[in-house]
Amino acid sequence: MGKKFLSIFVVTILLIAALLSGCSTKQNTASSNNNNKTNSVQKQDASKPVTLKLGMWSSSPAETKIVNDQLAAFKKKYPNINVQIETIVGDYMQKLQTEIAANVAPDVFYLDSMPAPQLMSSGVLEPLDDYIKKYNVDVNDFEPSLLSAFQWEGKTYGLPKDYNTLALFYNKDMFNAAGISEPPKTWEELKADAQKLTKNGVKGLVLSSDLARFEAFMLQNGGSIYKDGKVTLNLPENAQVLDFYTGLITKDKVADTPQNLGGGWNGDVFAAKKAAMAIEGGWMIPFLKDKAPNLNYGIAELPEGKQKATLAFTVAYVMNKNSKHKDEAFKLLEFLTGKEGQQFVVDSGLALPSRKSMEEGFRAKYPDRVAFIDGAAYSYPWQFGLLGTKVSDAANKASDSLIMKQAKNAQEALDNAQKQLGQ
Amino acid sequence: MRAHSISKKRYINEAISGYAFMLPFVISISAFIIGPLIYAFIISFKDFSYLNPSSSHWVGFKNYIGLLNDQTFKRALLNTTIYSLFVVPIQLFIALVLALVVDSDIKGKTFFRVAYYIPTVTSTVAVSVIFLYLFKADGLVNTILSKIGIHGQAWFNNVNFALPSIMIMAIWSSVGNYMVIFLAGLQDIPAELYEAAEVDGANKFQRFVKITLPLLRHVVFFNLVVSLIGTFQIFDQAYVVSGGSGGPLDATMTVVLDIYKTGFKDFNMGYASAMAFVLFLIILLLTLLQRLLFREEMY
């Protein structure tokens, strides 16, 4: 009997604990609702300290350091606003999505240009226009192509924190050995140089089968991928480019994919000196410093076709619509993307400052990296409206099918991709 | 009369304490498994995104009808079926052989038992990354092949070899799990049966076919079901090997990877839930079919 009593007792305790924990979350949400209502009153009371959550991912310790330094400077300026960093490890959008659904997303968070339209259109982000006016933020100082990635139906939802553009990395030693004095300026030169550089198991160029690389060439050729809300993958201008691009691999045999050259991405192959040229962004620099510290390389603007064009990969700070401290959140957002915050980006050299007024400082500090900044003026944001990665998936398949010789020509492959997208 | 009421009271008491013991489990399983399951079933009939749950609306069978014309989903189903057809029998066969080996009186059998089981406790992601290195263009496999004059390729980047490479990896990494279950089954078979058969003059093969296999039938059935469900749910290996894309050219696109991409990359949770229920239905049907096939001699 005693034993039985004991077991029932334990189970009851467990039960009560479970029920209580269920109740306490309910109480929490109730009190937070109250907070929401009294929020407007509290806002006026600036002396009261508030705590904001900042959502980010971290590609490297260097990136974490930038944000920490920025926040330390922010704390000096606004001692009453505490900022708590929430670093999301793993799949950022997956985690963020569930946090948004559960209403526990950070007040201010990173947002990549690609999924931005999805979030902007679904109304989970706070439009910033009123705050921009209220705090008199000079948005014209941002690179227009970067800012446009975070505008939707006439409203601005995010301020770009930094960006990177594509440029041509070339191995100076290999260029010297092949008697080439400067990096290629046109497609013809690119092909001719790659031909000269291809020998002894080394390819002239490493090319990934990725829209995030060959779209730059399509834009240079007067093509487009997504225009006025429509997918335009199968334009003849695009097909020409894809034939040229994959032809360098399959016909001319002066280039190959990173996978076929024993790497995971272009950086691996370029660092291992198995290719003389690679098309990548500024993220290559810390990678090469780590993996191939003695590599003698240069960075040039992309060779041009009918016109100059490159891709801009940018990330913005955006504000959660359900943030309880919107004014404070905007102050944080403005600081991080303002001149003071951007100075830390310039100093690190990891990415480019999104404000035009900060470019001079970057040029002076990193003269060998100006190709990225030069590209900004003619760059296009990496974004395809609400279709997002579906478009890049379809385009990558088209180029895969050409490289693996499963399709006759680029036009056919792109027609298929266009059809698959239901356009 | 009095005795009856006492036993009734006792019965109720026992029932209450029984249910009380079950309650924590029932609560947790309803909160974390059954609840989400029902919720997923409901949103599979909706146009639903976690980004904005309030704007979701009923679309009837639209998601399910859409699946009929979804080339990627069909390819994913085909890939998963092929994967399952190869992996399940090969894996169970090897597991049975290994179980027989480590069940016999060979020297150092504890070592072998551990060695065969280690891949199972290794994280599938870690295993996938190791295999990526083994199978890459200038990896170990190709280096060995080139010694005997075969020019290898980037295995995981080849339309024809990507899926088989994942199969090899899956068989290697999960065979130990089934081996252990077979081993438990083998040790359940009474030694007297073998002794009696030996006395009757049955040779090793006859003993295996007439005693081991029939008595192992329920273990085989269990392994078959678990293995089939496991193969139909393959995700992590395909995700790591293709970098989440299911490439090259959808060669490693599996149903669960497709669900993941649709739900978390394209923010289309309703459609992804519909896919998940189609997968659920397929697994359910296959399991019932197996039950039917094994029923006659199961007991």
Image (cartoon, coloured by chain):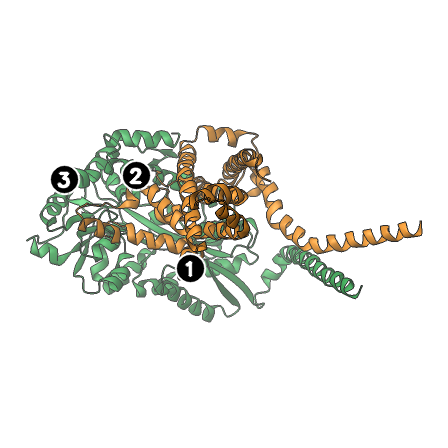
Chain colours: A green, B orange
Lateral position of residue B203 relative to residue A201, left or right: right
Q: Nearer the viewer, residue A315 or A355?
A: A315
Q: Nearer the viewer, residue A169 or A267?
A: A267
- Quadrant placement of the C terminus of chain A: top left
Q: Secondary structure at mark 2?
A: loop
Q: Secondary structure at mark 3?
A: loop
The CA distance from mark 2 to mark 1 is 40 Å
User: Residue B159 has which mark?
Assistant: 2
The reply to whether residue A128 is in sight is no
Could you tell me the amino acid type at mark 2?
Val
- The chain holding disc 1 is B
The CA distance from mark 1 to mark 3 is 57 Å
User: Residue A252 has which mark?
Assistant: 3
The reply to whether residue A65 is in sight is yes
Dot 3, crowdedness within 10 Å: few (<14), some or many (≥20)?
Answer: few
Could you tell me the amino acid type at mark 1?
Lys
Lateral position of residue A336 relative to residue B280, left or right: left
